[in-house]
Amino acid sequence: MIQVLCDILTSGGLPGKKSEHQLYLYFAADDLEYQAAFSCERLGMGAFRIALESVFNRIHLKPLEYTSFGKPNPFVFQSAGAILRNLQLSRQSNDLSGDKDAIRAFRTLYMIDDNPFVDVKGAQQAGHPGF
């Protein structure tokens, strides 16, 4: 699997050909481990990314380039904060009472999800919501 992916990434999508540029690579989730129905934690997409990156970087001169979305990437938490801020502004503009202080800036955001270790790490990397 890793061999085939390395071939595709360095060939412009046509294995057997050589390309100067690596194809874009995106990971939707970067959890190293996750809890499933199995009795202990399972390796997630983050483990596969680490394995691919390790092999790719050893056999190619340029390091693997990729974009990772999902926790614990701070982008996910920052995006959620931006969405909440937009909802807050929308609600404020629809407030007919004229009370501009009715909706105050966020001081704290709380998140509930399935993997506390990853969630806390991502939130710490994202920093204070700053709204």
Image (cartoon, rainbow, N blue to C red):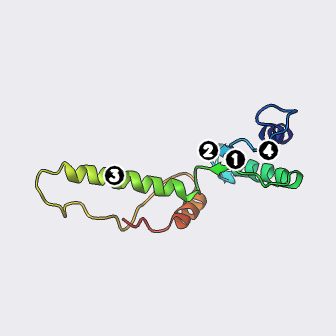
Q: Which residue is mark 1?
A: 45
Q: Amino acid at mark 3?
A: Asn
Query: In terms of sequence position, does the residue under pointer 3 or pointer 2 come before the other?
Result: 2
Q: Which residue is mark 4?
A: 20
Q: CA distance from mark 1 to mark 3?
A: 31 Å
The reply to whether callout 1 and callout 3 are in contact (CB within 8 Å) is: no
Is residue 44 visible from the viewing direction of this image?
Answer: no
Query: In terms of sequence position, does the residue under pointer 1 or pointer 3 come before the other?
Result: 1
Q: Secondary structure at mark 3?
A: helix
Q: CA distance from mark 3 to mark 2?
A: 24 Å
Query: In terms of sequence position, does the residue under pointer 2 or pointer 4 come before the other?
Result: 4
Q: Which residue is mark 3?
A: 86
Farthest residue in the front direction? Answer: 20
Q: Amino acid at mark 2?
A: Ala
The reply to whether callout 2 and callout 1 are in contact (CB within 8 Å) is: yes
Along the horizontal axis of the image, is 12 left or right of 83? right
Q: Nearer the viewer, mark 4 or mark 3?
A: 4
Q: Which residue is mark 2?
A: 28
Q: CA distance from mark 2 to mark 1?
A: 8 Å
Query: In terms of sequence position, does the residue under pointer 2 or pointer 1 come before the other?
Result: 2
Q: CA distance from mark 4 to mark 3?
A: 41 Å
